[in-house]
Image (tube, rainbow, N blue to C red):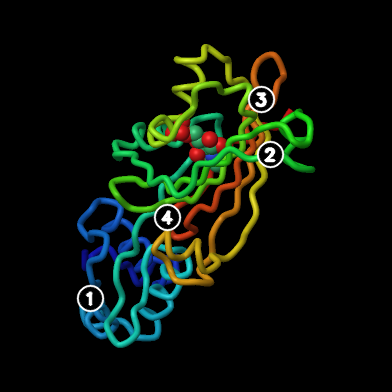
């Protein structure tokens, strides 16, 4: 590692250190939650100033690779789950990453659709809807809190047991409906009290607020979903093409 720093390179030294630390994290030589050497140790190892080391570490903290704990040291942060924005289900996303999905059901009730929700689901105010609140976990770590609204007439037979597994699997395989497209909105937000409790993060922590409107092939709205994703665990990736 020592010879990874080249004082004659046009690349700034702090940048070279940043890349070296990042490389060790990516290769798994430094593991999630592990404490990294102190500024002093890095400075001695590389024969550079502590200021330079500090700059590299600060950049890595800002980029989410490292996290500083007051009075304790600097640690490798939990790496974020990367999700390509596509019309996939939570269950599919986690399985594709080799993580075990699970669900904690917070609320499951039948209520009457009002205003925006009725309009979004293409039903009349007063029609019955399922209102479901679920915490979605990956390898037992809470990732997101989802509130889902579905027209009761469309998803006949839905029950508490089903929504503890995959909703999309039930809709496609049991009901034989074709999920086709969705519109998704992404916003920055902070965890409120109840959200912070179920997601096991501090109140006020940054989160991603996502609203998904999903439709069937025949154009009927299937679901309205509002999800709160942990900002420290998730990043969403959008592929874009010009032309
Ligand atoms: C994802 C969807 C959500 C959908 C759920 C179905 C986002 C932001 N949301 O969490 O709209 O209801 O998957 O998952 O991606 P399931 O089939 O595992 O129940």
* Mark nearer the viewer, 3 or 1: 3
Q: Secondary structure at mark 2?
A: strand
- Residue under numbered circle 4: 233
**Under tag 1, what secondary structure?**
loop
Name the front one of labels 3 and 4. Answer: 3
- How many callouts does the rendering have? 4
Q: Ligand 1 closer than 8 Å to the CB at disc 4? A: no
The quarter in which the C terminus is drawn is: top right
- Residue 217 image position (x, y, % from top left): 66, 15
Asked whether residue 84 appears in the rendered view, the answer is no
The structure residue drawn at horizontal position 38% and vertical position 53%, both measured from the top left corner, is 142
**Real-space Cα distance between discs 4 and 2?**
34 Å
In the rendered structure, which disc, 1 or 2, sits on the residue that comes first in sequence? 1
Residue 222 place in picture, x, y as percent: 63, 27
Above or below: residue 24 compared with residue 90: below
Dot 4: what SS?
loop
Mark 1 → mark 4, Cα distance in angstroms: 24 Å
Q: Is residue 64 left or right of residue 238?
A: left
Mark 1 vs mark 4: in front: 4
Residue 206 versus residue 103 in the image, above or below: below
Q: Nearer the viewer, residue 122 or 112?
A: 112
- Check disc 3 and report the residue beneath it: 215
Residue 37 marker: 1
Q: Is residue 145 left or right of residue 28?
A: right
């Amino acid at each position: 590692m020592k010879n990874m720093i080249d004082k004659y390179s046009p690349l700034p030294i702090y940048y070279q250190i940043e890349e070296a630390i990042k490389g060790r994290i990516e290769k798994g030589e430094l593991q999630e939650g592990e404490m990294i050497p102190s500024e002093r140790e890095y400075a001695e190892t590389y024969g550079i100033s502590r200021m330079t080391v500090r700059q590299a570490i600060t950049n890595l903290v800002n980029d989410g690779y490292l996290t500083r704990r007051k009075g304790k040291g600097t640690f490798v942060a939990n790496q974020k789950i990367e999700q390509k924005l596509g019309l996939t289900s939570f269950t599919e996303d986690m399985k594709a990453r080799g993580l075990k999905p699970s669900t904690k059901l917070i609320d499951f009730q039948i209520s009457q659709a009002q205003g925006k929700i009725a309009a979004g689901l293409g039903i009349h105010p007063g029609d019955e809807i399922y209102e479901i609140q679920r915490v979605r976990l990956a390898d037992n770590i809470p990732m997101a809190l989802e509130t889902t609204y579905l027209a009761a007439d469309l998803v006949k037979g839905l029950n508490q047991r089903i929504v503890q597994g995959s909703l999309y699997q039930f809709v496609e395989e049991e009901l034989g409906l074709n999920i086709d497209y969705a519109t998704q909105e992404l916003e920055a937000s902070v965890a409120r009290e109840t959200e912070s409790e179920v997601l096991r993060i501090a109140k006020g922590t940054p989160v991603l607020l996502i609203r998904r409107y999903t439709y069937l092939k025949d154009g009927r709205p299937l679901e309205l979903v509002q999800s709160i994703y942990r900002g420290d665990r998730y990043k969403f990736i959008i592929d874009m093409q010009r032309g």
